[in-house]
Image: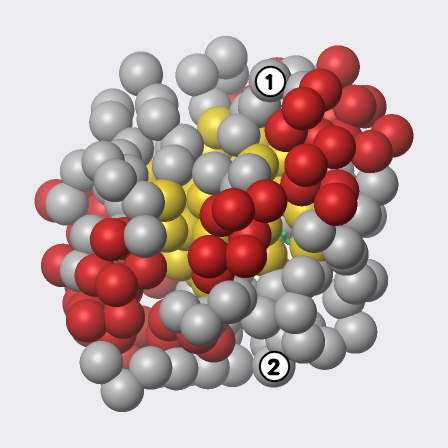
Amino acid sequence: MTTQLHGLYGITDSQLLPDTNALISAVEAALKGGMRILQYRDKSQNKIKRFNQASQLKALCQQYNACLIINDDIHLAAEVKADGVHLGQQDQAITQAREVLGKNAIIGVTCHDSYPLAEAAYQQGADYIALGRFFPSATKPNAPPASLCIIQQVSANIPLPIVAIGGITLDNASMVINAGAHLMAVIHGLFASDNIQGTAQQFTQLFSGASCIS
Ligand SMILES: Cc1ncc(COP(=O)(O)OP(=O)(O)O)c(N)n1
Ligand SMILES: Cc1ncsc1CCOP(=O)(O)O
Ligand SMILES: [Mg+2]
């Protein structure tokens, strides 16, 4: 699989979109607006719901030639044949994800505001580095804050795509892009919008040629 990681990276949230039909419609609107990378993020312990929603999202993403990344759960990613997994510092290890998901899987790692964490993720075989939160976040207000300088430091030294996360909106997205971020990971600024398709389109237009090609 050839993968270009670039552009709008939408993330679902089980509190913002608890209902499956609403979730699928919201994601389809974002895909119609140009989103090509989606993360399924559901913090519930409801295995059946998680499997059903992730399977439906996998089929939908395939229809739009988009990637599906699963948050936290390597085994769910394997079960639904997702394109990859996102791991935080408290989640399972990169090596374990690679073993289960294989060499072509996209493995992303949260590195907060830390260059040493980013360097370690690179050495351990991560495919992208997630930095943030850069702005106040309605979804995760207590996530550790990060300064835009970390984007410049990582992009100057580590040859991996950088995902910026935390409170990103159409109003502040250019700040993370200008600092060197390759992708913007967005929950509230996308999925709480009254016009998800239009918002995704505007985010996508901030980049040119954003894509995830399988
Ligand atoms: C793209 C992206 N970046 C960061 C995170 C946060 O991951 P984590 O620190 O494991 O926190 P939770 O999302 O699991 O609450 C992410 N999910 N995606
Ligand atoms: C999961 C996560 N990790 C750091 S901030 C954040 C939430 C991002 O959501 P929003 O785009 O609504 O701030
Ligand atoms: Mg996590």
Name the residue tied to disc 2: 138
SS for callout 1: loop
Q: Position of residue 40 (x, y in %)?
A: 44, 56
Q: Which residue sits at x=23%, y=36%?
A: 209
From the viewer's perspective, tell me whether residue 98 is left or right of residue 188: right
SS for callout 2: loop
Query: Which residue is situated farthest in the right direction here?
Result: 116
Q: Which residue sits at x=63%, y=29%?
A: 155
- Picture mark count: 2
Name the residue tied to disc 1: 159
Q: Quadrant of residue 199?
A: bottom left
Please name the amino acid that badge 1 sits on. Pro
Quadrant of the rendering where the N terminus is positioned: top left
Residue 71 vs 142, above or below: the answer is above
Tell me the crowding category of disc 2: few under 14, some 14 to 19, or many 20 or more residues within 10 angstroms, Cα based: few
Q: Which residue sits at x=79%, y=74%?
A: 142
Q: Position of residue 3 (x, y in %)?
A: 34, 23
Residue 105 or residue 194, whichever sits in front: 194
Task: Identify the mark nearer the N-term, 1 or 2.
Answer: 2
Residue 42 vs 21, above or below: the answer is above
- Using the rendered image of the protein, determine whether residue 54 is visible from the camera's viewpoint: no
Q: Is mark 2 within 8 Å of ligand 2?
A: yes
Calculate the distance from the C-alpha at mark 1 to the C-alpha at mark 2. Answer: 31 Å
